[in-house]
Image (cartoon, helix red, strand yellow):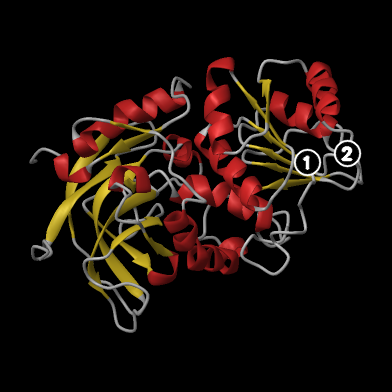
Amino acid sequence: MLPPVATQHKALFLESENGPYIVKNVKTSDPGPGEVLVKVEAASLNPVDWKIHNFIKEFPLPIGCDSAGVVAQVGEGVTRVQVGDRVAHQGGYAVRIATFQEYTIIDEELVVKIPDSMSFDQAASIPVAVAAPAIGLYGDKVPLGGAGLIAPWQHGGHTEYAKKPILVMGGASSVGQYAIQFATISRFSPIITTVSPENKDLAASTGATHTLGRSLSPSTLADAVVAITSDPITVVFDAISTPETQEAAYKILAPGGTLVVVQDEAIKTKQDDKKVVRVIASGHIPANARFAKDLYAHLGDALASGEIKPCEVEILPGGLNGVAEGLERLKNGTVRAKKLVIRPPETSDL
């Protein structure tokens, strides 16, 4: 039996644009109609967490957008989950829905039940990293949406892309790992990815059929792709999206194809017959709202079947107090092939 919901709980805030991260006590919100209150057991860190102050200027700013935990309360009309269910979900940068806190609120349509075999730490690695390739590949063809491919759970989703090649730039990153898994479910073949030599086995374990060195020059990379397949590469997912990786990917992309990037577009010279899609990995923005609900309606089955597997995680000590160090590591680019995760219940008393 779950303990009573606390009237107050600890939450992490960025105090000012260049200020420290601080833990404060906040009032625990009640879920409204269609909403779920989740007791957060684990929350993962994303690069956007240290970049968000560039976009939102209201301080103190609550942060965190990935979590897993237990349903503590449900609002009126909620039918998809019930109190006690183990779930994961994507949050956002507002007091009620941020995930670097002990309790958070989420729309029931953006919650997924997790298998009993999956830990909260593993589940917390999923929502944002899954959203980027899912929305980027299958989301609606609207600004900040996706490429509009047929999703695996839709009619034709298992046949339309069979024996068609795909390139994933950065296949060992958390986003890249999920992009490869979705490409596998969609039956793309070959699935080509760029990784460092030490991560070749990891990429293969997620479904990549061919791995190429991430440090190859654009021309050498293009030649290596042609050596693997003579078929045109009409879909490229760039999980890194630096100017260099975007240019290399765009060079390989065939006319009529689509390049999906996870950072601002940086292609210097574009062609009318090559499309670039900038994906925002959030189900909370209007462009992605419809597709995100569709994704979450089917994600549970993919997790239960093992079609979508979680990334390797590293647990940071100190609960919410461990976030600052973890974000600094993400900012410095020293995190490789895993997700950093904190456990809010481990936060020391104020």
The quarter of the displayed image where residue 341 is located = top left
Badges 1 and 2: C-beta atoms under 8 Å apart? yes
Quarter occupied by the N terminus: bottom left
The residue singled out by tag 2 in the image is 231
Identify the residue shown where x is 72% and y is 48%.
Answer: 277
Identify the residue shown where x is 70% and y is 69%.
Answer: 155
Q: Can the viewer see residue 172 in this picture?
A: no
In the rendered structure, find residue 236 and report the number of the disc placed on it. Answer: none
The residue singled out by tag 1 in the image is 165
User: Which badge, 1 or 2, is on the more N-terminal residue?
Assistant: 1
132 left or right of 221 in image:
left
Identify the residue shown where x is 80% and y is 21%.
Answer: 224
Query: In the image, residue 25 lies at what x, y percent?
Result: 15, 50
Q: In the picture shown, does residue 60 fall above or below 9?
A: above
Q: In the picture shown, does residue 221 fall above or below 231?
A: above
Identify the residue shown where x is 38% and y is 25%.
Answer: 328
Gap in Å between the C-alphas at discs 1 and 2?
7 Å
Question: Which residue occupies the foreground of this view, 154 or 320?
Answer: 154
